[in-house]
Image (tube, rainbow, N blue to C red):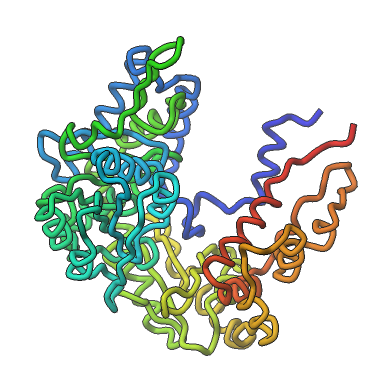
Amino acid sequence: MTDALTQLREMQSADLPVHGGRTLAYVYDSGLPDIDRIGREAVAAYAGSNGLDPTAFPSLLRMETEVVGMAADLLDAPETVVGTVTSGGTESVLLAVQAARDAHPKIERPRMVLPATAHAAFHKAAHYFGVEPVLVPVGPDFRADPAAMAAAMDERTVLVVASAPSYAHGVVDPVTAIAAAAAERGIRCHVDACIGGWVLPYATRLGRDVPAWTFAVEGVTSISVDLHKYAYAPKGTSLLLHRTPELRRPQFFASAAWPGYTMLNSTMQSTKSGGPLAGAWAVLRSLGDEGYERLARDVFEAVDRIRDGVGEMPELAVVSTPDSTLLALTTDGSCDPFTVCDEMAARGWYVQPQMSFAGSPATIHLSVSAATLSHVPELLAALGEAVEAAVAAGPVTVDPAVAAFIGDLDPFSLSEEDFDGLLLAAGLVGADSADGAESADGAESGLALPQRMAEVNAMLDLASAAMREALLVAFLDRLTRPTRRSR
């Protein structure tokens, strides 16, 4: 019988690499093998511990309060600050929205004001908690417009949001003006620093020009910051910090309305493994302030070198000067970004395609890690080759009749059979998958994942937001159907 761990390693060989600085999305690599080892060993040591009851596992309570304390020092927090460890940025965002809603039980139809570039996690929170998102267009530099944000606030607004930075373009919103407008109206202001929270303070120390966004800004009431991003901790840990205990209290849930133990939760989870928290604590203690400053110096040097290298490629341009570690690249029309992404993948680099939005063209997204620095020459060489190949191939085109057909479809009236046909036409499933064929070993075959995505992305880019969502939901549904063995 094949050893399960051996089989795991074999399966993992098909995944994107999590080390080496070549995966510029989803993972964040310090480039320090010892730090990675420490984090993994800590996760394993606490994998069986349960964070449900902090009195049963006091070591988890100690680690949580110490991790929050480290973040408080980094984020210029007052002595009154409190915080909670969550499973990731989305949970931190959900809790920030839920707490803001529940702080105003008399508001029947609460709203939150978001720049159009705010993370989609806020839309998820709106869907879950019934808080209406009021989307405000951003300026030409992709930063939030404080005057427009202020004008969108009203008596039903329970939360105002700013990003530090926004994911799509890597720029920090003008938090000072936004928070001041919110405070004037008695509204909470949340700063989504999930991706920048553990690196931007060091950027400031290094003399980089970063707009103010921490608790030092009056009116900022809460901040989310992920530890599994630029704190380089194992997945998945994030923090949600509130300026005062009173602001956090609506986040908590308690129920004695049943015959078992009184349920008491600080997050959306009840049972939660102590492993991720232990991994984060161990990595934070091991790297320390000086370690993070060195890593920040490396990642920002990598960002600058990539930006300068892109500047020498006439077919590419940086969409907006980045404030943080994220870059968005656009093309001049001689090639399309989707083909560039495919060509980069063929050369061993994963960069993320971003669809067109609100009149802005599709882009190429790079999340740069400290480990990327030593590979920047290889990255730029691969990018140059990818652009050259994409120019030679020409922009991806979609048949006008197909484009018109997609534009006329109503995603809310399509049947399961319609979705099967559309997924097949888009290249998201193979013919065998659509027919429900089985593989040779008796397991259902699952979806035939395309090796190149440019044509698929070009078709999705033409679809309305609602149609794109419906198609990808249908794809995910089929992707995650169970594998069954014949009996």
Q: x and y percent of residue 396 in the render?
A: 62, 82
Q: x and y percent of residue 143 in the render?
A: 27, 69
Q: x and y percent of residue 120 in the render?
A: 42, 57
Q: Residue at x 70, y 63 (%)?
A: 428
Q: Quadrant of the C terminus?
A: top right
On screen, 183 above or below 248? below
- Left or right: 2, with 332 as reference point: right
- Left or right: 295, with 483 as reference point: left
On screen, 389 above or below 249? below
Q: Quadrant of residue 9?
A: top right
| Residue 424 visible in image | yes
Viewer-proximal residue among 19 and 160: 160
Q: Residue at x 27, y 50 (%)?
A: 197
How many labels sit on residues? 0
| Residue 28 visible in image | no
Q: Quadrant of residue 289?
A: top left
Q: x and y percent of residue 135 in the render?
A: 33, 64
Viewer-proximal residue among 403 and 85: 403
Q: Quadrant of residue 249?
A: top left
Viewer-proximal residue among 252 and 139: 252
On screen, 448 above or below 328? above
Q: Quadrant of the N terminus?
A: top right
Q: Residue at x 33, y 41 (%)?
A: 98
Q: Residue at x 42, y 59 (%)?
A: 372
